[in-house]
Image (cartoon, rainbow, N blue to C red):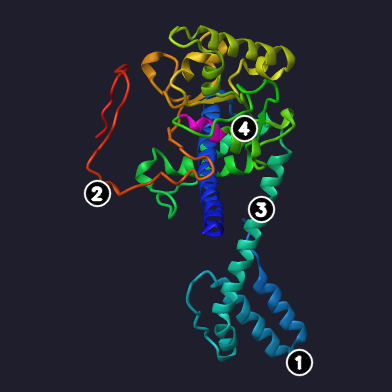
Amino acid sequence: MELSCHCFGHKIVSYWRRLFLLLIFTVSWFVLQIFVHNYVIPPNKHLHFFSRQTNSLWYRSSNSTIRSNEFLKGAILQEAHLTFPYSVVSPNSTNKFVQSVSVEQDSVDNRAQRKKDKNVASDKQTDMRLLSPTEALVYAKKEIDHATFVNQDPNLYAPLFRNISVFKRSYELMETTLKVYIYRDGARPVFHKPSLKGIYASEGWFMKLMEENKQFVTKDPDRAHLFYLPYSAHQLEVALYVPESRDLKPLSIFLRDYVNKIAAKYPFWNRTHGSDHFLVACHDWGPYTVTEHKELARNTIKALCNADPSERIFIAGRDISLPETTIREPRRPLRYLGGNRASLRPILAFFAGGMHGRLIALG
């Protein structure tokens, strides 16, 4: 039984990691999409395989010159009609052999074309890796603005998106291009120590999986498109808040001093006034930890569980609403999640806390 629990426990954690990796991909895509649209200023030949096959047959032919000429003529005619999905009826009996291989030849040509397209895409991806971050973002914006039209996708529910073509192309570019630099500055427990348990666990799991990630994270800040401020609003509250004081200013002053420190130490913040930096905070007080630094509040991209526009801190269209998920056991994070499907649940919604902000009904 212990062995089964151990095995299934690892399997569940693996599923949970995949779930939060998906969360990282989604939040990263939103961050890249918002940054590209708000801060970046924008600046097929066919394969003739059949011809080569015909030439090969020509040189191997032992027939007379006349028969070879007739065969070549029929092959050229067949190549001209190769775009049709059906066999071509040749006017002579000498073209029957060409007709019999037309379907197979079309399949070979299609494979060759797909291989060529794949190589072109690979070359383009390699070229993007050679671009500077600014050049890559300009290229990405151009690609997104001229995205190939898509009206359906087997992996996406089209009516859910404002523009599925733009989303699909920008997501593809995000997965192949985006690089994030994580500041190493900052002492624990406020920085680099994710809280993986409780109602604020979303920010902790994001930090943990982002710092372990090798696809998006770069150790070279000069190659980065975005910069992550790895602090925990929950840990900040635990470390600095005086119970019953109702004074949140020490929290915002602490984060202000941190931003001033990295702005003085590195050139990246001052280069964009923080517009290519982002933070993730799931605590209710997350928005209030940025109020003492004007650029942090106005320019930085914020992924918040408390995404309340009425506070004038969360800015719709730039900032991101982060889902809040309660985790009871970090080693088995999926143990208490799930439940009956929606049609079998007697309670539509549950709310705890004080009423504030506007309630917007969607229906």
Q: Which residue is mark 4?
A: 137
Cα distance between the residues tagged 2 and 3 = 50 Å
- Amino acid bearing label 4: Leu
Foreground tag (1 vs 3): 3
Asked whether the viewer can see residue 294, the reply is: no
Cα distance between the residues tagged 1 and 3 = 39 Å
Q: Which residue is mark 1?
A: 62
Occupied quadrant, residue 128: top right
Q: Which residue is mark 3?
A: 120
In the image shown, does 240 or 268 lie closer to the viewer?
Answer: 240
Cα distance between the residues tagged 2 and 1 = 77 Å
Tell me which residue sits at (66%, 68%) in the image.
Answer: 48
Characterize the magenta stretch by its predominant secondary structure: helix
Foreground tag (2 vs 1): 2
Q: Residue furthest left?
A: 346
Judged from the image, the secondary structure of the residue bearing numbered disc 4 is: helix
Question: Of the residues under marks 1 and 3, which one precedes in the sequence?
Answer: 1
Judged from the image, the secondary structure of the residue bearing numbered disc 1 is: loop
